[in-house]
Image (cartoon, rainbow, N blue to C red):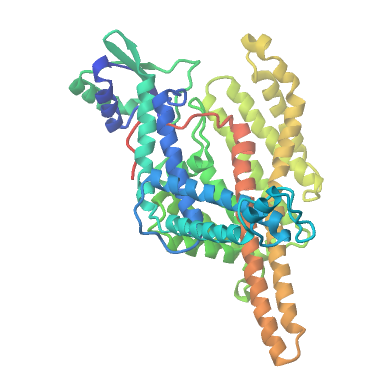
Amino acid sequence: MIVKMLHLDLLCVAAEVDSTLEGLRSLGAVHLDLSSAQGAEVSSAKGDAADAEKAVRFILKARGKGAEGSVRRTISEVLDLQKSLDDKKDSLEDLNREIAKYEPFGDFDPELAKKLLDRGIDLAGVAELPEILPPKRLSGMKSDAAELKSSIEADISGLAATDEKAIVASFPELAERIAFAAAKELMLESGAVSVISGWIPARRLDDLKKTASKDGWGLLTREAESDESPPTLIEPPKLFRPMRVLFEGLGIAPAYTESDVSVPFMCYFSLFFAMLVGDGAYGSIFLLGTLAMRKKLPRSWFVLLTVFSASTVIWGVLSNTWFGAQIPALASLPTVHWLADPSYHNMMLLCFTIGVSHLMLARLWNGVCRLPDSTAIAEFGWAGILLFMYLVTNSIVGIFPAIPQWGFNMFYASLAGVFLFSVKPSEFKTRGAELGMLPLNIMSALGDIISYVRLFAVGLASVKVAENFNSMATGLVAGADEMWVKALMAVAMVAILVVGHALNLAMAGLSILVHAVRLNTLEFSNHKGVSWSGTAYSPFKRKKV
């Protein structure tokens, strides 16, 4: 469900702007569009936040993977120390160039040479001198370089010893400063009154009214107009509420007038996750890692990762795939035999079936939502067209011998429903051209169903890569004769298995980001009519430390 929003205009006494914003921030319910604020106070606050981030980066870079620091330094002290370090590095680089330039001439005294040359003494037969004499002798420059190196090392050690936790702890406060300065800039003054506009969930209006009554604010609320874009606050059923953090992580939100697709997104994403990883052992690693991080992970991420990992383990049982090998005890499962079809027809059938169910769900959902409007017929017609394209796809790859006659009858009826009811007669002048795109849209629907075969292709590739690493590793020991050679090959075998499967696991994670996200946010969303063009609801409130 997408929570209903109300547009809000809040009026206060101009002299009480700061206290009003403090009250709004404590309430934590009003969404303000702060992106347009670019004033001096905002720029200053953003500059301070950037300095804090730079200070932490400098500390971590100097420390590398060493122990934690314990010295307390302010942000300015860290930046000054880094500037001193950069200046010294530049000076050392210049000095090293000078040393390289004069080193071929040896360690002579440039002051003595200058005095002799000034007196007209020809030194050509005694020593070769550069056209321009150095500021000091070579040994002195090398001594200066050594001192600079020592000073640079001391500065690096000083940065590495700095405790960055206090600076990191200031990040929420700095973010609050930016938001407060931006909100203050958005306050419009009209004489003795200031006003600010935003959005508030309708269910939080009573809380706002209580605060307004206590603090003496004036409120004006109204419904969103057709040309406005309120922020989107999704509220899925409790079981699917963790999906909000995934949307936040991906940086996506449906538009306010669109639908909350959290439930199908989570269900199908779990299935896609399992099939793309394609290995129960990898799923077990994900699951064990998630359980080990239980206390450190936010609850929503813990729930999501547990569901996704458990789904992968279940897929591993059904397909009997564990690190690219099989467990004999599971080999007799009917699903193992069915998925192991050497023609791969069963796996492709499964992918196409998942695809058509996913896309038909979107169209049927649209149709139900549009009832009793006549355009619902067009949405149901699209569901029929998708089912026909499913038959076509399976026929093309040889899974079905032919398309049954009922499929053609359904296609003709569905096509008529789409053509007759997609555009209302009153809209024909403005949207009539959409009917001309119908053949292309039908072919696009065919391509959408076919695209779900990536679940099979990527999952199979992951399994084959694992099998190849296994073969490489076991082949080493099999080819060894002497005991010491076998021992050496055993070490190499373990290294190949660890590195190979770790690489395959990382590639599986990448494929999830690419393919599982795409199938939900592109193929499914195009049919559902979700553009992901919304702005996520982000109330003006205090940041959690």
What residue is at 72 percent from the left and 52 percent from the top?
Answer: 348
Where in the figure is residue 319, as x and y percent of width and height?
Answer: 64, 63
Looking at this view, is 291 or 330 the one in front?
291
Where in the figure is residue 52, as x and y percent of width and height?
Answer: 42, 43
Q: Is residue 343 left or right of residue 43?
A: right
Residue 505 appears in the figure:
yes
- Which quadrant of the structure image shows residue 172? top left
Single out the residue that lies furthest toward the left. Answer: 214
Q: For the N terminus, give its image quadrant.
A: top left
Q: Is residue 286 left or right of residue 435?
A: left
What residue is at 41 percent from the left and 41 percent from the top?
Answer: 237
Is residue 494 placed above or below 292 in the rendered structure? below
What residue is at 28 percent from the left and 20 percent from the top?
Answer: 17
Is residue 257 placed above or below 161 in the rendered structure? above
Q: For the C terminus, give its image quadrant.
A: top left
- Which quadrant of the structure image shows residue 334? bottom right
Looking at this view, is 206 or 408 the one in front?
206
Tally of numbered tags: 0
Looking at this view, is 81 or 423 the one in front?
81
Where in the figure is residue 284, as x and y percent of width and height?
Answer: 53, 65
What residue is at 27 percent from the left and 32 percent from the top?
Answer: 26
Single out the residue that lies furthest toward the bottom. Answer: 482
Is residue 259 placed above or below 264 in the rendered structure? above
- Which quadrant of the structure image shows residue 530? top right
Looking at this view, is 288 or 481 the one in front?
481
